[in-house]
Image (spheres, helix red, strand yellow):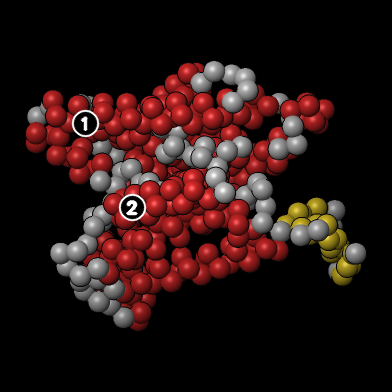
């Protein structure tokens, strides 16, 4: 069925819609659009909660005045621009990066467990960052480079050690779990062998937190999201074709090795930059694509939906720990680890039914 008005023609194909606007064809999914709107509303609500609540409560009017006058010398301006806004921006960018990275790797591996944390990329990025912080005394973007390098090394080892052929994906997941254990042991060994004063900085970073974030912490995740998410959006079109099988991909001119390499590079950069901004954050890249898949009803999840789901999964726990009574607050990485562990158990038990 088509609908024509002012040069706009709309056709329905199942749950999808194809819109032709003066010769430009756009494919969109109403359910995915609704999911993005709901997720965006949740993010806005979390941001307002984090801006107004805390040890010093602010009204919405006070927050608005502080945002409108960033150069003003006031207590509200310091709290909003110097403490809470960097925390929110860092959490938003980190969650989006991890959600999109998880979607790319799970779609590429065609396995719901093929997320960066399961195949060892998060542990590799953490090891690289700790090496940079403790041995090379890196800060800022240099720590980000160290995290990305560690993530790239982990990805290279995982793909190199997994034998090709039947069962490659299952072996990749198992090898990734082994590499995660090795990276964790290497990180612990490094922290116990260096100067304790230097080791403290690495141990604090390994907790994974959004507390005490400054604008310098937000830069890696924001830069990776701005650069890589549009690229991921383009790559998803090729991933949809790859779902049809290698033979059809070859007939359609899709070069699988190039697409695989591009997806891996984008996923590694997103994961490494996110970990460099906050420290290791579990659960996000594993659960966000699966939740987004249920929200949209699509096998290949749109990048925007996966990214926004990742942001929600990080900001909601941050709101919970942010509002906890004094003495009971915990880093958000601890909260996501607990939830992620329970989710993984649930996923495994559910898959056996």
Query: Residue at position x 60%, y 53% from top?
Result: 293
Query: Residue at position x 25%, y 77% from top?
Result: 57
Q: Nearer the viewer, residue 180 or 316?
A: 180
Query: Residue at position x 66%, y 48% from top?
Result: 299
Element at label 1: helix
Image quarter hosting the N terminus: bottom right
The local crowd at label 2, few if under 14, some if 14 to 19, many if 20 or more residues have their Cα within 10 Å, is few
Q: Nearer the viewer, residue 228 or 177?
A: 177
Q: Position of residue 64 (x, y in %)?
A: 37, 76
Q: Which residue is mark 2?
A: 338
Q: Which mark is residue 91?
A: none
Q: Which residue is mark 1?
A: 188
Residue 163 is left or right of residue 187, and the answer is right
Q: Nearer the viewer, residue 94 or 297?
A: 297
Residue 282 in sight:
yes
The local crowd at label 1, few if under 14, some if 14 to 19, many if 20 or more residues have their Cα within 10 Å, is some
Camera-near label (2 vs 1) is 2
Q: Position of residue 210 (x, y in %)?
A: 30, 54
The first of marks 2 and 1 along the sequence is 1
């Amino acid at each position: 069925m088509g609908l024509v008005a002012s040069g706009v023609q709309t056709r329905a194909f199942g749950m999808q819609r194809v819109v032709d606007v003066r010769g430009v064809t756009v494919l969109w999914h109403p359910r995915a659009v609704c999911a993005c709107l709901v997720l965006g509303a949740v993010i806005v609500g979390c941001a307002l909660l984090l801006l107004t609540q805390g040890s010093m409560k602010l009204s919405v009017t006070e927050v608005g005045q502080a945002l409108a006058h960033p150069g003003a010398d006031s207590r509200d301006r310091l709290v909003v621009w110097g403490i809470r806004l960097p925390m929110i921006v860092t959490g938003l960018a980190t969650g989006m990066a991890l959600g999109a990275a998880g979607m790319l790797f799970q779609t590429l591996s065609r396995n719901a467990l093929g997320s960066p944390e399961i195949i060892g990329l998060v542990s590799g990025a953490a090891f690289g960052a700790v090496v940079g912080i403790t041995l090379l005394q890196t800060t800022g973007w240099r720590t980000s480079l160290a995290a990305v390098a560690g993530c790239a090394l982990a990805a290279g080892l995982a793909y190199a050690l997994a034998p090709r052929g039947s069962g490659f994906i299952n072996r990749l997941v198992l090898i990734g779990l082994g590499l995660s254990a090795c990276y964790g042991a290497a990180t612990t060994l490094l922290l116990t062998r260096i100067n304790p004063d230097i080791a403290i900085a690495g141990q604090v970073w390994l907790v994974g937190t959004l507390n005490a974030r400054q604008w310098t912490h937000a830069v890696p995740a924001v830069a990776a999201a701005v650069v890589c998410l549009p690229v991921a959006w383009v790559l998803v079109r090729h991933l949809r074709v790859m779902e049809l099988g290698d033979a059809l991909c070859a007939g359609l001119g899709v070069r699988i090795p190039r697409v695989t390499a591009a997806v891996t590079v984008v996923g590694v950069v997103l994961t490494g930059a996110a970990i460099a901004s906050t420290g290791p954050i579990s659960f996000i890249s594993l659960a966000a694509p699966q939740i987004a898949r249920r929200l949209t009803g699509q096998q290949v999840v749109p990048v925007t939906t996966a990214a926004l789901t990742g942001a929600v999964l990080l900001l909601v726990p941050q709101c919970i720990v942010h509002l906890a009574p004094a003495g009971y607050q915990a880093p958000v990485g601890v909260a996501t680890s607990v939830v992620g562990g329970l989710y993984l158990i649930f996923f495994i038990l559910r898959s056996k039914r």
